[in-house]
Amino acid sequence: MKFVLLGYMGSGKSTVAKALSNKLHLPCVDLDDYIEEKEQMTVNKIFQTQGEVYFRLQESKYLKEILEMDSELILSVGGGTPCYSNNMELINQYSRSIYLKGSIPTICQRLRNEKDQRPLIADLNDGQLTEFVAKHLFERRNYYEKADTIINVDGKSLEDLVSESTLSLKEYLK
């Protein structure tokens, strides 16, 4: 079985995926890292040189490639991945999905500390950041909420999130 973690940037997808991978002794794959390896270029560079349309096409192709692999794994996907092509349908067809849901204040608080690592928000002030996040969450909510499980991340530790995730996957674990 494959388990996919999805949610907005700053929700903790990569961190929870790695911790869950350690706890369940399953390999962990980050879709952006996989794309970078396959394309021999960073995601930022792909966006700059090839454009978003090209990136989204490659993202869908590699997502399907990973989901069709004959192995169990934990996969964390980019914040926009479920919202393009038929990616959310693919995710739910081939895996059990968990949406790590954060409130606007929680997401903004986390992102403020990481702005220099995230080109999309690097130049936004606090007010602009809040508006940016609120708009994206509103637009993406319908996709994210198609996940098999929704876990609220607000005020929870990594251990809490891993425990809740494990509990939600219990029936699918050997």
Image (tube, grey):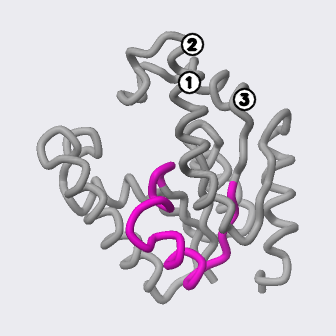
Q: Which residue is mark 1?
A: 131
Q: Amino acid at mark 2?
A: Gly
Mark 1 secondary-structure assignment: helix
Of the 4 image quadrants, the one containing the C terminus is: bottom right
Across and down, in percent, residue 55 comes to: 26, 55
Q: Earlier in the sequence, mark 3 or mark 1?
A: 3
From mark 2 to mark 1, how far is it between C-alphas? 6 Å
Compare residues 82 and 14 and report the one nearer the observer. 82
Q: Residues within 10 Å of mark 2 (few under 14, many from 20)?
A: few
Determine if the magenta segment contains residue 85: yes
Q: Describe residue 131's horizontal placement relative to residue 104 as left or right.
A: left
At x 80%, y 47%, the residue is 152
Under tag 2, what secondary structure?
helix
Q: What is the spatial separation of the Cα atoms under label 3 and label 2, in whole angstroms?
A: 14 Å
Q: Which range is magenta?
A: 78-99
Q: Are marks 2 and 1 in contact (CB under 8 Å)?
A: yes
Q: Position of residue 150 (x, y in %)?
A: 77, 59
Residue located at (72% from left, 47% from top): 101
- Dot 3: element: helix
The amino acid type found where label 1 is placed reads Glu
- Tag nearer the camera, 3 or 1: 1
**Labelled disc at residue 28:** none
User: Residue extending furthest bottom?
Assistant: 70
- Which disc number belongs to residue 106? 3
Q: Residue at x 20, y 48 (%)?
A: 41
Q: Is residue 61 magenta?
A: no
State the residue at coordinates (56%, 32%): 133
> Where in the figure is residue 67, as x and y percent of width and height?
47, 79
Mark 3 is on which residue type? Answer: Thr
Disc assigned to residue 127: 2
